Image (cartoon, helix red, strand yellow):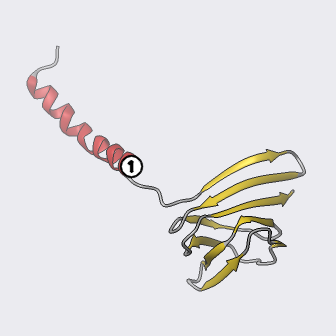
Amino acid sequence: MMTLKGVSRTAIALMPLVLIASSQAGAQSNAGTIKTVFENDKIAVMDNLLKPGEESASANRTGLIVYYLSGGTYERIFADGSKQTMTSKPGQAFLNPEKRPYAVTNTGKTALHVITIRLK
């Protein structure tokens, strides 16, 4: 049988865990969505959506084939803090030559919708 004193100690001990869990659950993510639509041992195809103000995590994107379903303005942010502003148009496609990992932030007023293909 647990006493009131025991309940109080348990509640105090668990309080930080509850606060951490609730703060993580209440945190708003500013990350875009990436969904793998096809993958096998030779290729991976991803559907990427970044709404205005959203960002993607820093990643190595060397050799990605990129196809823009919708265009817009975005920034590449490199590990050293340097930035590169880019503009894309719907239907534009290219093989990404950038060798440095970078994050992407949609700085435009419209959603960026991109299909990326990675050869394995």
Relative to 43, is 80 above or below? below
Where 100 falls versus 64 (above or below)? below
Number of labels in the image equals 1
* Residue 86 coordinates in the image, percent (x, y): 67, 81
Residue 89 spot, x, y in % from top left: 73, 74
Residue extending furthest top? 1
**Left or right of 101 in this view: 43:** right
Which quarter of the figure has residue 64? bottom right
Q: Return the residue nearer the eye: 13 or 37.
A: 37
Furthest residue to the left? 4
Q: Secondary structure at mark 1?
A: helix
- Residue beneath the point at 81% across and 59% down: 117
Residue type highlighted by circle 1: Gln
90, 10: nearer the viewer: 90
Residue appearing at x 16%, y 34% in the figure: 9
> Quick one: quadrant of the C terminus?
bottom right
Image spot of residue 84 (x, y percent) = 64, 84
Comparing 58 with 75, the one in front is 75
**Position of residue 108 in the picture relative to residue 41 (left or right):** left
The N terminus, quarter of image: top left
Q: Mark 1: few, some, or many residues within 10 Å (few <14, many ≥20)?
A: few
Residue at the image point whose x is 54% and y is 72% from the top: 109
Q: Position of residue 11 (x, y in %)?
A: 19, 34
Residue name at image x 79 percent, y 53 percent:
45
**44 to 8, vertically: above or below:** below
Q: Which residue is mark 1?
A: 24
